[in-house]
Amino acid sequence: MNINLMRTKSSIHFFQIKGETRNCIAILHEGQQTEILEQGPSISEEEAKGFKAHLSHLFSKADAIAMSGSLPKGLNSDYYAEIIQLANQQHIPTVLDSSGQSLMDVLLSESKPTVIKPNIDELSQLLQNTVTIDIDSLKEAVTQPIFEGIEWIIVSLGGDGAFAKHHQTFYKVNIPNINVVNPVGSGDSTVAGITSGLIHQDSDKDLLRKANTFGMLNAMESQTGHINVNKFDEIFQQIEVIEV
């Protein structure tokens, strides 16, 4: 993994644990997709503390922090909340893409992330109420008191685009039809676009366009977590962001 990342000229600061990194295998066959997800390692209390210390040392180099996925075994459900608290103390913006109890613990904590990115099903689960793609339903959902203090709420609507709230302004994102080859990793690619938008201080509409462009470009490729930058402008220009 280290060698492959070095080829992309990524700056690598891994924290070593005793357990092995899990494999996530996506099988594509005649337009059908099957995912095989191994069970991940269990993190010890010592490793959990060590990673937070390791991360704290990296804060001086960070313009933003993105956190994505479920927490591995061994970590308390408030682990993301603890990291966000550390980042907020250093005034570093944070993007969180998680669900379930780990997201709930963040929402109930005093330290809020800059951005959360639930999909519509995760939003419904969080609120224990069905949320539809109707604009009024989405507005009502993201203005619930539990989201108070979060600057950006970006809700993925799948093929229907996205809905977003930034401070007190609402946006609907309309996306073009594309040939979906492999959607695995599109959520993480969208998070990368959001994080890039924060770092470069993009306008609201450009941040949302960039985020959705990254996600769509990933879905158009067979390789997971890969985008063809030569197609960026083509997709970016087709995405419509409307204040609603």
Image (cartoon, helix red, strand yellow):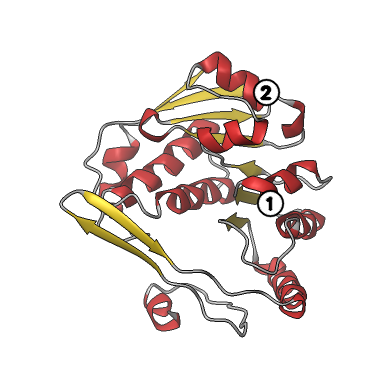
Q: How dense is the environment of label 2, judged by Cα within 10 Å: few (below 14), some, or many (20 and up)?
A: few
Instruction: Using residue 226 as the reference point, say whether residue 199 is left or right of it.
Output: right
- Please provide percent x and percent y for residue 129: 62, 25
| Residue at 60% over, 20% down | 139
- Is residue 136 at all visible to an observer of this figure? yes
Q: Name the residue that disc number 2 marks.
A: 168
User: Tag 1, which secondary structure?
Assistant: helix
As measured in the structure, the alpha-carbon distance from the residue carrying label 1 to the one carrying label 2 is: 25 Å
In this rendering, the answer to whether 58 lies above or below 192 is below
Question: Which residue is located at x 61 percent, y 85 percent?
Answer: 18
Residue 37 x %, y %: 43, 64
Specify the quadrant of the image occupied by residue 23: bottom left
Q: Nearer the viewer, residue 197 or 85?
A: 85
**Relative image position of residue 12 (x, y in whole percent):** 53, 77
Mark 1 lies on residue:
102
Q: Quadrant of the N terminus?
A: bottom left
Residue 11 appears at what percent x and percent y?
Answer: 52, 74
Residue at far left of view: 30
Q: Amino acid at mark 2?
A: Gln
Residue at 67% x, 74% y is 43
Mark 1, other Cα within 10 Å: few <14 / some 14–19 / many ≥20 = some
- What amino acid type is highlighted by mark number 1? Ser
